[in-house]
Image (cartoon, coloured by chain):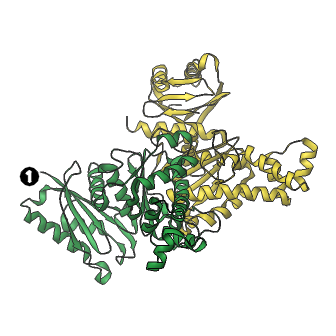
Chain colours: A green, B yellow
């Protein structure tokens, strides 16, 4: 291999995903290292750089073939200065990650929030390929998001932009959210939120598929709700409608303000696929400006676990042109 | 005068506002010409350029002292190519305004939507001075808006971004909007919308100040509602609360997604001043993420009728650096 490579690094709570990509965004090599959270995560970046330098040797390439690296991390980040303000899961606080990794690898490094980079990945090589204006929403245990406008990640004044999960979706009598507010999108559109809505629905109307699941297993998951709905279970369908009504409302209002070309739905809940998209679309069209409803594409994310490293490489490539 | 000037042009339905500004954004000369809407508005730009060239002679300066011009116009604009797709009020359709004005004035010209440029004006020299991330909302006959993120106007995929007035504010049983939807922000936060809410409130509860105004004049205006509320009239206060509850909800959700430094409130309704801001703030804080609630400044617009020409000059200056 005698090409040039971008390095994508996606730091998670249990593993760090790593990849070498060519300048077209094709993954040439990918692997993982364990996230060592000991002593406030001080070993994580050293493990990462050791692993990268070993991989360089193993592949028989030279350090000069690495162009730049992008790092995605959870938490609150000063992207301008490449400093992690706080990443609770990793133990990092006021950590100058960009400076450290540039010294370790001797290449330019850029850092951003992992949800923003997942959006960047889908924009570059995924469901939003080529979209200069894109909304990405991740429906997992929580609800995360990333906003790309005019080809750039929107960070806002203090780096908090894209917190789609904490948009107020239920205006009155919403459920409490971890953030301290009530009725956030996360309370009704995350896997946890959908499971809660399912449990409440079956308590109100104890019949059908969800009642059976609850009796058998003592609990209900978001997947149970979608399985039931796909099979025509009335209570399950009402839960999917309730959840997607809120999600469609929030996404339509973001689209009314931001006019994205594509909205990409990712995370565990998105495994419900086109069934989910159809319900979101129905609600979206009720609340979107007619031209926005017509012009906005809503798609399931395509890159799954690779979105982060691809987005990190995308940012590295983008920023490198300014260096 | 032997300085260099930026030219700001703000095209409205009855007059075109014109100004020469220095590179710091200080208006050195401002004037207006009538908007000649005859024959699909084909004379408007010729009138504008004639007037500018006359002003150059009158001030004893030379054409070479004009650096660049920015034009704000109502309607739907392809800013990339400087083409007005449609401006119904002016009769323009698929009109290559940038090309025409560049030929007439022989300087670089940039074009954008007037609401976006009003946001740019407030960002450069007004209530949002220096904010790289700003939301501007104009509460007039309708509700308009402009979004600036990372120092740039957000246009979206087809130039429709910033349509804050058509965000769904009343999710169920909202009033019909001109756009064909129901419950848009415009139906409850424009001067027209507030007047309607006032009329409905006094019909439900025929007493107090609004009842008196209605009996005397046969109608109620947004100003009547604010006058009543400021004097403690209970029905008026309930209307202000209802309107600002919706406005605060929409602005908080935009802020949750975009993390602006400043939200600027302009238009006729904003004459209600800090009284209005206090009510918006109360609702905003209920729906904003705690850190967003704490960090976001909400202010009344400062530039009034000059916002458009100042914003146009700001854009001209900004784009000129790329030419």
- Helix, strand or loop for disc 1: loop
Q: Is residue B259 above or below residue B185?
A: below
Image quadrant occupied by the N terminus of chain A? bottom left
- Image point (42%, 36%), residue name: B320
Pinpoint residue B73: horizontal percent, then vertical percent. 57, 32
Residue underneath mark 1:
A2
Say whether residue A183 is left or right of residue A225.
Answer: right
Q: Quadrant location of residue B31? A: top right
Q: Is residue B125 above or below residue B55?
A: below
Pinpoint residue A4: horizontal percent, then vertical percent. 15, 52
Residue furthest left as drawn: A60
- Image point (16%, 71%), residue name: A50
Q: Is residue B62 above or below residue A220?
A: above
Q: Quadrant location of residue B35? A: top right
- Image point (50%, 47%), residue name: A258
Pinpoint residue A226: horizontal percent, then vertical percent. 45, 63
Query: Is residue B301 something one can see in this rendering?
Result: no
In this view, the residue in front, A223 or A6, is A223
Number of numbered tags placed on the structure image: 1
Query: Is residue B115 something one can see in this rendering?
Result: yes
Residue furthest top as drawn: B39
In this view, the residue in front, B315 or B254, is B254
Crowding near the residue tagged with mark 1, few <14, some 14–19, many ≥20 C-alpha atoms within 10 Å:
few
Pinpoint residue A111: horizontal percent, then vertical percent. 32, 62
In this view, the residue in front, A4 or A138, is A138
Q: Chain of mark 1?
A: A
């Amino acid at each position: 291999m005698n090409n040039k490579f971008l390095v994508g690094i996606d730091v998670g709570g249990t593993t760090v995903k790593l990849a070498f990509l060519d300048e077209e965004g094709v993954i040439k090599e990918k692997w993982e290292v364990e996230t060592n959270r000991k002593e406030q995560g001080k070993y994580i970046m050293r493990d990462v750089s050791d692993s990268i330098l070993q991989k360089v040797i193993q592949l028989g390439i030279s350090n000069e073939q690495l162009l730049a690296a992008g790092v995605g991390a959870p938490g609150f980040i000063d992207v301008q200065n490449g400093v992690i303000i706080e990443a609770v899961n990793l133990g990092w606080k006021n950590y100058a990650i960009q400076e450290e990794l540039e010294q370790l690898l001797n290449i330019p490094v850029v850092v951003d929030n992992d949800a923003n980079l997942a959006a960047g990945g889908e924009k570059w090589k995924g469901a939003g390929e080529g979209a200069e204006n894109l909304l990405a929403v991740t429906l997992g245990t929580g609800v995360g998001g990333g906003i790309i406008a005019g080809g750039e990640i929107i960070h806002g004044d203090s780096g908090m932009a894209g917190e789609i999960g904490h948009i107020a979706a239920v205006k009155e009598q919403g459920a409490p959210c971890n953030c301290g507010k009530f009725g956030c999108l996360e309370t009704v559109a995350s896997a946890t939120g959908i499971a809660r809505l399912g449990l409440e629905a079956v308590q109100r109307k104890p019949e059908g598929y969800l009642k059976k699941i609850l009796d058998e297993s003592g609990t209900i998951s978001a997947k149970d709700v979608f399985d039931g709905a796909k099979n025509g279970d009335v209570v399950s369908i009402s839960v999917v409608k309730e959840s997607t009504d809120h999600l469609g409302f929030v996404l339509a209002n973001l689209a009314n303000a931001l006019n994205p070309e594509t909205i990409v739905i990712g995370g565990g809940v998105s495994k419900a696929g086109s069934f989910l998209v159809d319900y979101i679309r129905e609600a979206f069209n009720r609340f979107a400006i007619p031209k926005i409803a017509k012009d906005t594409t809503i798609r399931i994310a395509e890159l799954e676990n690779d979105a982060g490293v691809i987005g990190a490489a995308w940012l590295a490539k983008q920023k490198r042109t300014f260096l």
